Amino acid sequence: MIDLRPFAELGRFENDWLSARFHFSFAEYVNPDRMGFGPLRVWNDDTIQPGGGFAMHGHRDMEIITYVRRGAISHEDHLGNKGRTVAGDIQVMHAGTGIQHSEYNHEGEDTLIYQIWIEPASTGGPPGWSAREFPKAEREAGLVTLASGRPGASDDALPINQDASLLAATLEAGQTTTHALEPGRRAYLVPATGAIEVNGAALEARGGAAIEGEDRVTITAREDSEIILVDLP
């Protein structure tokens, strides 16, 4: 089963520095049919204007992945971590017992990010933050694992505290890639750019596809496309 969520149907929020779209219920946007997907709780599509950002605030017991699509995001937290993550790279924050952090766009252009929140397999872990550069060319051959808590995951993947993986690929028009789903697992798929078909169903840029009961996800790019997929229990 594939449940398509077109971009135009997502929740939305606007202020003077942020334009956000919500794949799942978040803040004042509440959709009883979209409260999460397995342990995936949040997938926010944020456009942050120069100088804008999220002032110091707290989280706990959540694995928070930031995938930067354009520009860069600058992170700072109460543990002393500081970093700047650029387009195509990711950062992972383990909220654990509690973390205070800020995220700002200090660039001269809009920054586009995905915020992806995954509930941890166990609560009360130590808080932390890490980021990693990933060679963009590797993704042109198919899906590459960027973050994972699954057994046997690549050493290059940033660790998360859940039996889940985040993968990404950059496909040229006409190119196809596949991802096998083990029995009982599900996937959430978003084309950040372009247009794709997923198991024959058409999906435009920035929409989502919730996939269950399938043993394989076959993705064909109808246009040059950047795709992100989360494999979930």
Image (cartoon, rainbow, N blue to C red):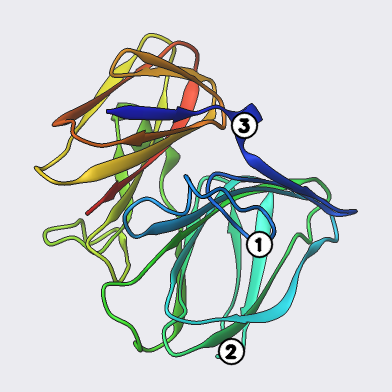
Per the image, label 3 sits on a secondary structure element best described as helix
Mark 1 or 2: the one toward you: 1
Q: Circle 3 is placed at which residue position?
A: 9
Q: Position of residue 223 (x, y in %)?
A: 50, 13
**Residue 229 quadrant:** top left
* Side of 81 where 187 appears, left or right: left
Q: CA distance from mark 3 to mark 2?
A: 39 Å
Can you identify the residue that label 1 sits on?
27
Q: Amino acid at mark 1?
A: Ala
Cα distance between the residues tagged 1 and 3: 17 Å
Q: Give residue 8's position: percent from left, percent from top.
A: 65, 28
Disc 3 residue crowd, few under 14, some 14–19, many 20+, Cα 10 Å:
few
Residue 80's disc number = 2
Is 178 drawn above or below residue 39 in the view shown?
above
Q: Dot 2, crowdedness within 10 Å: few (<14), some or many (≥20)?
A: few
Instruction: Give the percent coordinates (x, y) of residue 116.
Output: 48, 56
Say which residue appears at 56% left-offset and 82% top-offset.
Answer: 81
Q: Amino acid at mark 2?
A: Gly
Left or right, 55 with respect to 133, comes to right
